[in-house]
Amino acid sequence: MSDVTSSGKLAIYPGTFDPITNGHVDVAARAAKLFARVIVCVAVNSAKTPLFSGEERVEMIRQAVKNIKNIEVDAFEGLLVDYALEKKADAIVRGLRAVSDFEYEFQMALTNRKLSAEVDTVFLMPHEKYTYLNSTIVREIAKYGGDVSQFVPPHVKTCLMAKLKKMQ
């Protein structure tokens, strides 16, 4: 059986990742098996007020994926399609947890295709144990003193608890 990643294809896995969860890491690892290179890319959006800065999120992601050789981490502002074209990406990877994600992600994929037919969107499902999980839930649990150990990598839990403590 041939190695799919030998094709030299590059994928961009964008997101807010505030913070990165085990579900995000799972999707990134799945993408890394399908593409020669994957850039996990933090979307820096001035309209949003994330808990962590772009730099903090990039560093947390670097730690979370450090053992996956063909993953890089970056950040971008602006249109995702422009970033993908600048990087000469072949695909954008999006995670689908549940049917409820599909409508929004489908709309974004079609919009991106209108902006540039050169970049395809690939949908990947995380392991079923992560289908309910998102960053908002993790932040809420942590905010109220709940244990997030099963939801995020250990260093992310440490960063999250330190950030919330600082905010008190």
Image (cartoon, rainbow, N blue to C red):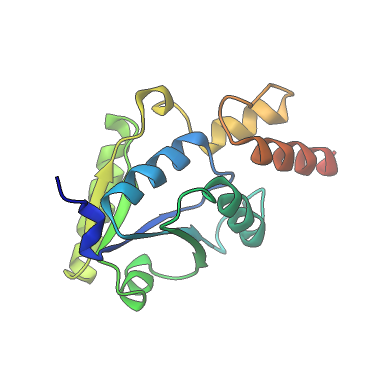
* 144 and 72: which is toward the camera: 72
Q: Residue 88: horizontal and vertical position, in percent? A: 30, 74
Quadrant containing the N terminus in the rendered view: top left
Please report the residue visible at 57 percent of the width from the left and 64 percent of the height from the top.
Answer: 46
Q: How many marks?
A: 0
- Measuring from the top left, give residue 65's x and y in whole percent: 51, 48
Q: Compared to 137, does 12 lie above or below? A: below
Residue 34 appears left or right of 63: left
- Locate residue 103, reporting x and y percent: 25, 41
Farthest residue to the bottom: give it.
86
82 over 159 or under it: above or below: below
Q: Left of 120 or right of it: where is 148?
A: right
- Quadrant including the C terminus: top right
Relative placement, left or right, of 20 versus 35 is right
Answer yes or no: is residue 49 visible.
no
Tell whether 157 sits left or right of 79: right
Q: Residue at x 55, y 60 (%)?
A: 47
| Residue situated in front as seen by the camera: 29 or 146 | 29
- Judged from this view, the residue extending furthest toward the front is 1
Quadrant in the rendering for residue 8: bottom left
Q: Residue at x 79, y 41 (%)?
A: 162
Does residue 86 show up? yes
Q: Is residue 49 above or below residue 165?
A: below
Give the residue displayed 18% in from the left and 70% down from the top: 118
Q: Quadrant of residue 84?
A: bottom left
